[in-house]
Amino acid sequence: MLYRSSIEVSRLTRRQALRRLAAAAAAAPWAARPALGQASAPASASAERPNLLLICVDTLRASHLGRFGYPRGVSPNLDALAANGMLFRRAYSTSSWTCPAHASVFTGVYSPAHGVDNPDCALPPAMPTVAQLLQGAGYATQAIVSGPMVSRKQGFDRGFDDFDDRTYVAAAQVSGVQDPKLVEEILLYRTKSADLIRQNAERWLFDAPRPQPWFLFVHFWDAHADYKPPAPYDNLDPSYSGPIDGVIKSDYVNADMPQTDLHHFMSLYDGEIAWTDSQLGLFLKTLVDRGVTRNTCVILFSDHGEEFFDHGDKGHAHNLFEPLIHVPIMAYWPGRLAAGAEALTPVSLLDLAPTLLDLAGAPTPEWMQGRSLKPLLFGEAPALPQVPLFGALFFRQRSQLCILDYPLKLINDTAARTFEVYNVADDPAETTDLYPATHQLADSLFPRLQAWWDESSAIHARFA
Ligand SMILES: [Zn+2]
């Protein structure tokens, strides 16, 4: 029983809990298996042109994974993926919500370059996506998505032979609701589909043989609010009796809510992680059992995290603090990547497109702002030269930029004209603003932020 093991873990010391989590991860049923079974990967997929499986677990806060020290035991399969592959411990999103983050994943450029700052914006038509580039390189391309913020409207379907958004489109149609506002509410807050998404991905993989290598993007939405996981994952806090039901817009969910209510609210979010993790475990087991992982590099990421009043607010898309932009990135390719390796080089979601192209043997366009992580994946380099990472948020009256020259992070609220500086290694909770005492830090970082803005704007102008 998930909840029983979770409660056990919560009573352990952190060291004991981590040891137990490591053991559980190593013992995940799919992880210890050699890649047996019938080879479903086509012969043309090879070490030089492997299949590429890109998985997004939307709204997955890095610090809620066992591999990052979370003691609740809600992510055994994600932890096993990292334990048997490579974990990028210092991975960052380019924003704090779905559209701009996914746009960076698909284009390899930052928000001011792709311009997808709200759900009604689309990728510049002339800017090729990684799916288009892989398609051009001879890959079969398929997307299976589950949330309304990764849609055709933003141009995310470009380059996919098939863009399967049928699961969440059907969710609104089945309800029979006509009011567009209510349809949006259903798609954003009530879509539960991790099991269907997994089954659709398995069906695509195994129903028809393909003569060429493939690129498959699978997107899980369930950890996004509202938090209403199915049983038994809704029972991580069994002694609770109160008004919290996982609805994020509830009046009971506010900065002054009692600790017991907040704990239960987070328990329901954790339940969504556990539910999604269970489906990932089934998916990975199938991949290993059917021999897919022999010729397939799996890369998993989240587009942003989630806040539980760490900085006064809930959900996401409202600031650039660590709970929202520090994300998991991990890779798995048994026999090819060193099991249990960790990279400490700070990396960004916009590095994923160059990495995928590099793995496919395709050139990375010179205008992409990311860089390939392949040397880290294959142990060709213990680290990459550190470069500053950037973030941007222009949504719902927010206007913020950040530069992370690890471990120093400068956040510039361009509307309020304020600056904050944090050392995210010493102060990951970002409680001590270093700016008032050390203006020279901001003075050294701000010109680089300006130069990045100018570079990004020039890329946007080139493709507009
Ligand atoms: Zn998202």
Image: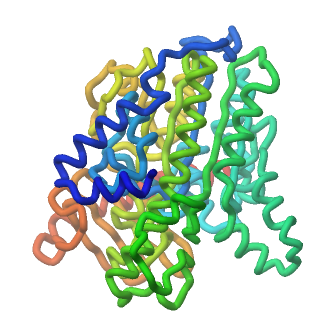
* Residue 194 visible, this angle: yes
Residue 272 as seen in the image, left or right of residue 260 = right
| Camera-nearest residue between 404 and 292 | 292
Q: Is residue 124 left or right of residue 427?
A: right
Q: How many marks?
A: 0
Q: Position of residue 250 (x, y in %)?
A: 54, 86
Quadrant, the C terminus:
bottom right
Q: Splitting the image into 4 quarters, where does residue 436 fall?
A: bottom left
Give the residue displayed 70% in from the left and 13% down from the top: 42
For the point 69% across and 17% down, which residue is it? 40
Q: Position of residue 363 (x, y in %)?
A: 57, 24
Give the vertical position of 167 relative to 76 (above or below).
below
Give the residue furthest to the top.
Answer: 43
Q: Nearer the viewer, residue 404 or 243?
A: 243
> Residue 435 appears in which quarter of the rendering?
bottom left
Q: Regarding ligand 1, which quadrant of the image does it lie in?
A: bottom right
Q: Position of residue 131 (x, y in %)?
A: 68, 36
Q: Is residue 102 above or below residue 251?
A: above
Residue at 53%, 45% in the rendered image: 278
The residue lying at 19 percent from left, 61 percent from top is 423
Look at the image and tell me whether residue 112 can be seen: no
Kindly give the residue lying farthest to the left in the view shown. Answer: 437
Percent of width and height locating residue 170: 83, 59
Task: Give the image quarter of residue 424.
Answer: bottom left
Location of residue 111 with respect to 248 vertically, above or below: above
Q: Give 16 or 95, whichever is nearer the viewer.
A: 16
